[in-house]
Image (cartoon, rainbow, N blue to C red):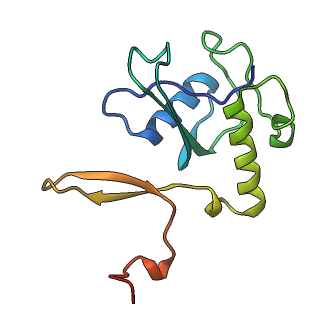
Amino acid sequence: MWKFPGGLSEPGEDIGDTAVREVFEETGIKSEFRSLLSIRQQHANPGAFGKSDMYIICRLKPYSFTIDFCHLECLRCEWMDLNDLVKTKNTTPITTRVARLLLYGYREGFDKIDLTMEKLPAVYTGLFYKLYHKELPENYRTVTGMD
């Protein structure tokens, strides 16, 4: 079945860094994190080591296009046209849904689908966290209340 590259995060590894690393390890494609697209939550997943599973799908920007895939992790690896991917029967429901989401982003603008990342100061001095959310319009970035 066709699916997008993916894998487990290393302890302390950010979501975008995991996506970039996993895509490179599985395909040989260097890329840059652009946004979060979707999150799947699943309980009682046999491959999740007895934990609830969060599968996070990111949108990346490729810096290379020549595939050099890992034969230990993949049987085949190729670029696919999203129009073809949404029609194929040989894929998973999440792959089909995300392909449709990406088609919508290409056609209507990624601002309609992207969850962007913003680094914000934590309540603990000197620490920061990353907040993923739909981007706020400029006029709402400094709004202090309902006028």
Check the image and name the residue furthest to the bottom: 147
Spot occupied by residue 51 in the image (x, y as percentages of width and height): 38, 21
Q: Is residue 74 above or below residue 88?
A: above
Q: Residue furthest top?
A: 72
Q: Residue at x 41, y 76 (%)?
A: 141
- Toward which corner of the image does residue 98 lie, by quadrant? top right
Q: Residue furthest left?
A: 125
Q: Residue at x 56, y 27 (%)?
A: 6
64, 72: nearer the viewer? 72
Q: Is residue 73 left or right of residue 66?
A: left
Using the image as rendered, state which of residue 22 and residue 3 is in the foreground.
3
Residue 119: x and y in percent read 34, 57
Which quadrant would the C terminus be assigned to in this image?
bottom left
* Residue 58 higher or lower than 137, as above or below: above
Residue sitting at x 49%, y 14%:
47
Tally the marks. 0
Q: Is residue 126 left or right of residue 72?
A: left
Residue at 83% across, 39% down: 81
Q: Position of residue 1 (x, y in %)?
A: 75, 19
Coordinates of residue 131 in the picture (x, y in percent): 38, 54
The relative height of residue 124 versus residue 87 in the rendered view (above or below) is below
